[in-house]
Amino acid sequence: MMTDLPLDQVRTLLAVVDEGTFDAAAAVLHVTPSAVSQRVKALEQRTGRVLLLRTKPVRPTESGEAVVRFARRLAGLERDTRAELGMSGAGEPTRLSIAVNADSLATWFLPALTRVPGDLPLCYELRREDQDHTAALLREGLVMAAVTSSPEAVAGCSVHGLGRMRYVPVASPSFVGRWLGGRPGTPLREVLGDVPVVAFDRRDDLQDAFVRTLLHGGEAARGTPHGRRGASAVRHLVPTSEGFVGAVAAGMGWGMVPEVQADPLLRAGRFVRLAPDRHIDVPLFWQQWKLDFPALAAVARAVTAEAAEALDHDARTG
């Protein structure tokens, strides 16, 4: 039973997962790396399961994820209890770990955090991850909440819709003149597969999904396998939201840019919209652990309120 697990061992496991290495966890806990290793081994012996993959950084196994989730819940409950009792140290900030995709982080998410009441002592640990993969961090117990594209709740989590982020296909005027201007009348679907494209990283499928919508005459699901990816093999990977927009504006390639970021550059003449009647809407959801945790509830309210203003209202779900 979880209540039979020694709390010092549980807290040590959490520290190792959060810090990434035994040495870093030892520094945070003010013990030796040997003591950290012994506690983790003792916990594994007690549970009869391997809890950590000894990689760099370490990663919890499926069993380890369950213990990490327990440890985070325990830490939150302990903070709330100390505050209610007026115990010393109760005013120390509560750390909230949240996974959020880069485009949300660059546009509407940080303003959402400014809505959180200022009298709550919070310390945010934001982990940037693609919205298609943030739910994995929830499952692993690495974060307490996430902005995700998955409407299916992770075990032990609640989920509700935030709205949709609209992406539009754009390029710089110089790019259009160089790569597209010499093929007047050629359908866009036959052009984009042969010209340079900007992608966020190797997992970014949004540009390919857009090309598939042109090829198949409708919206193609992201991540759906096809005989060809869709967009050009000349792919520039730029793994920041601002850098991605800058690369497209510089003429390195075309790309799918959040409408809120594209609009000012379209008005300034630095972007050309490649297909005025085409776009892709990516649904976003807020998932968080089911905890009676005031700080997390306050952040959820702030995120929901900001999303209601910043994202597509008509397409909201949940």
Image (cartoon, grey):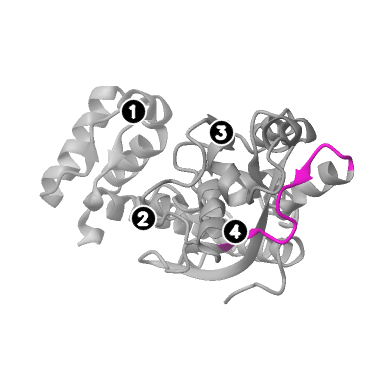
Is residue 110 shown above or below 178?
below
State the CA–CA distance, disc 1 to disc 4.
Answer: 28 Å
Q: Amino acid at mark 3?
A: Pro
The percent position of residue 197, horizontal first and vertical second, equals: 58, 36
State the CA–CA distance, disc 1 to disc 3.
Answer: 25 Å
The reply to whether discs 1 and 2 touch (Cβ–Cβ < 8 Å) is no
Q: Amino acid at mark 2?
A: Arg
Most foreground residue, 292 or 51: 51
User: Does any portion of residue 97 appear in the rendered image?
Assistant: no
State the CA–CA distance, disc 1 to disc 2.
Answer: 20 Å
Front of the two marks 1 and 3: 3
The percent position of residue 281, horizontal first and vertical second, equals: 62, 61
Q: What residue is shown with label 3?
A: 239
Q: What residue is shown with label 4?
A: 295
State the CA–CA distance, disc 3 to disc 4.
Answer: 31 Å
SS at badge 2: helix
> Which mark is first along the chain, 2 or 1?
1
SS at badge 4: helix
Front of the two marks 1 and 2: 2
Most foreground residue, 170 or 285: 170
Compared across the picture, whether 199 is left or right of 38 comes to: right
Q: Amino acid at mark 4?
A: Ala
Magenta span of residues? 268-284
Label drawn at residue 139: 2
Residue, far bottom: 318
Most foreground residue, 119 or 275: 275
Q: What residue is shown with label 1?
A: 21
The reply to whether discs 1 and 3 touch (Cβ–Cβ < 8 Å) is no
